[in-house]
Amino acid sequence: MLRIFSQYVRFVESVNYRVGRFVMYGIFLMVGILLWSSISKTFFLPSLWTLEAAQFSMVAYYILGGAYSLQLGSNVRMDLFYSNWSDKKKAYVDSVTVLFLIFFLGTLLYGGLDSTEYAFKYNERSNTVWRPYMWPIKSIMCLGILLMLLQSTCELIKDIAKIRGVSL
């Protein structure tokens, strides 16, 4: 049974690592969009799509990078007492708090899938002049939330293994 969990953790973490490393370069896409926005407003007619495209690329950047951030442990943590605790005590506390994260992400994914289904069903568009379809960004958001949910379960498995004194 431990082998299945170990394989699951390795698989999910390898997927999240690859997605995170790829999405990391999305910053250049955002910079390019915002640079074009500045150039077009200064020298040409202002582009209608740049603000919303920058917002969509920012959402994709941080939603898809969330699981990678969690994997690296670069998420924000209150370190008042935490740094003085033993690894086992940290694992106990983390295993409880990650349950709240899993519940939150599950609820978020449920709502996101419902919203994405609506966007597909009714060809939902943004209420701006550019009027892009909403299903692409909503699908990306659901994928990012799913990846974070999977990474959260990996963190729970690793914490339980640490409590039991088992290495994965």
Image (tube, grey):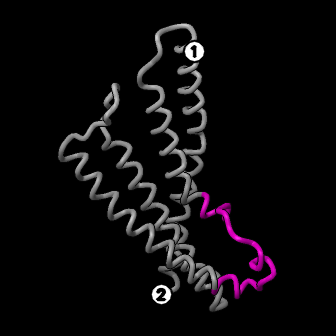
Residue 84 on the magenta segment = yes
Residue 18 on the magenta segment = no
Q: Amino acid at mark 2?
A: Met
Q: Nearer the viewer, residue 7 or 103?
A: 103
Q: Which is nearer the N-term, disc 1 or disc 2? A: 2
In the image, which disc is placed on residue 39? 1
Residue that extends furthest to the right in the rendered view of this protein? 84
User: Looking at the image, is 62 positioned above or below residue 148?
Assistant: above
Q: Which of the 4 image quarters holds residue 68? A: bottom right
Q: Nearer the viewer, residue 143 or 117?
A: 117
Give the residues in magenta.
69-92
Q: Residue at x 31, y 34 (%)?
A: 127
Q: Which of the 4 image quarters holds residue 95? A: bottom right
Q: Which of the 4 image quarters holds residue 35? A: top right
Which residue in the protein does label 2 denote?
A: 1
Which numbered disc, 1 or 2, marks the residue closer to the eye? 1
Residue 129 is situated, as x and y percent measured from the top left of the image, at 33, 25
Residue 99 is situated, as x and y percent measured from the top left of the image, at 50, 79
Residue 111 is situated, as x and y percent measured from the top left of the image, at 33, 61
Q: Amino acid at mark 1?
A: Ile
User: Would you call the spot at circle 1 few (<14 residues within 10 Å), some (14-19), or many (20 or more)?
Assistant: some
Q: Is residue 132 left or right of residue 21?
A: left
Q: Is residue 128 left or right of residue 78?
A: left
In the image, which disc is placed on residue 12? none
The reply to whether dot 1 and dot 2 touch (C-beta < 8 Å) is no
Tell me the element at label 1. Answer: helix
Q: Residue at x 53, y 58 (%)?
A: 16
Tell me the element at label 2. Answer: loop
